[in-house]
Image (cartoon, grey):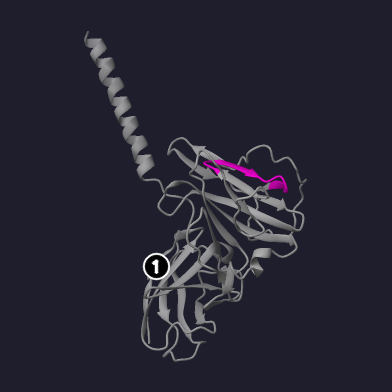
Amino acid sequence: MIQRKQIFIVSFCAILFGSLYWYHLVTSYESELGTDNTFVVNDADPSVSGATNDSLLSLEFNQGQEELEWAFTTITVYQGNNEFDCTLGGVTSVPKQGGKVNTRLNADGQTFTISVDATSESSFTKFSLNSMGEDIGENYSMRFSKTDIFFGENLSWFMVKDTDFGSLTSLPEGNFSDDNSERLDWYEYDISTHRVEASDQIYIVDDGSTIYKIQLISYYNQDDESRHVTFIVARLGGEEIAAIFDENLVQSSPCIIIDDNQIWSPYESIYIKENAFQICEDICDLEIIVTYESVKVKGTKNVQIQ
């Protein structure tokens, strides 16, 4: 009898400690996305004017050694209730409300970040590479439901691993496949934290006119809700992406990022300048939100422009 009690106590303690350890893993989980860099913001000019080309502010890192690629980065300036996306090339995406696909042009002005609501179990959310938006028809490029992702029948593709998205500027070696009957093997399941983690791989996709590079980066939105797939898309070859010239999707950016390369280095300051649009004509308070890989970067976000 005593031996049974000892076995029970040992088993109970093992289960308890195992449960507590698992709970610790889940609650203390930190995504590998984003950066540990932090930034500071400073007024860039002694004064602003009624002109529409004033330099507004500078940003630099005060902590961290990671170089941030503009293809994965967004910088947004808020002035009161007004929101201004800043990019290198002077074009940005048009804000849209509603729908199951959210599209945003990143700071490089060439890479789109796509967020898809894939919560439905009974139907697929469809996406078009041509329009960079939701497609309710049958000529879709990709379809999503939970972790299930399929390419459309009109595409050919192959996948490459161990390749950096920003450094991939020409078509790599690979054999295109027209078989789109199987769902993509795009993630790994971490049983210790019960989370879906996107694999480090890039899909090369040809729709007959444009060749794209696509990288799936997350299964969770900014509120950490699952079944919200985020991926990035850029042109790799062929014709230009049609959506870049769609005035319903892309517009002139009200502010420009002044930098001379495709990377924000830990050792440099970047500048935000008005782009033929008046953001501040007198003293004004600005808030700056920076994201990297769709995760907010920590930093000193508020600055008064004089």
Tell me the quarter of the image containing the N terminus.
Answer: top left
Using the image, determine if residue 74 lies above or below residue 140.
below
Res 234 quadrant in image:
bottom right
Using the image, determine if residue 241 lies above or below residue 59.
above
Residue found 49% across the figure and 42% down from its top: 120
Residue 267 image position (x, y, % from top left):
51, 72
Residue found 71% across the figure and 46% down from its top: 158
User: Is residue 192 or residue 78 the one in the foreground?
Assistant: 78
What residue sits right under mark 1 in the picture?
A: 299
Tell me the quarter of the image containing the C terminus.
Answer: bottom left
Number of marks present in the image shown? 1
Q: The residue under label 1 is which amino acid type?
A: Gly
Query: Magenta residues: mostly which secondary structure?
Result: strand
Q: Is residue 301 left or right of residue 131?
A: left
Residue 250 image position (x, y, % from top left):
59, 69
Using the image, determine if residue 306 lies above or below residue 156.
below
Q: Looking at this rendering, what residue extends furthest in the left direction?
A: 2
Residue 34 image position (x, y, % from top left):
48, 57
Check residue 96 for magenta coloring. no
- Magenta span: 145-159
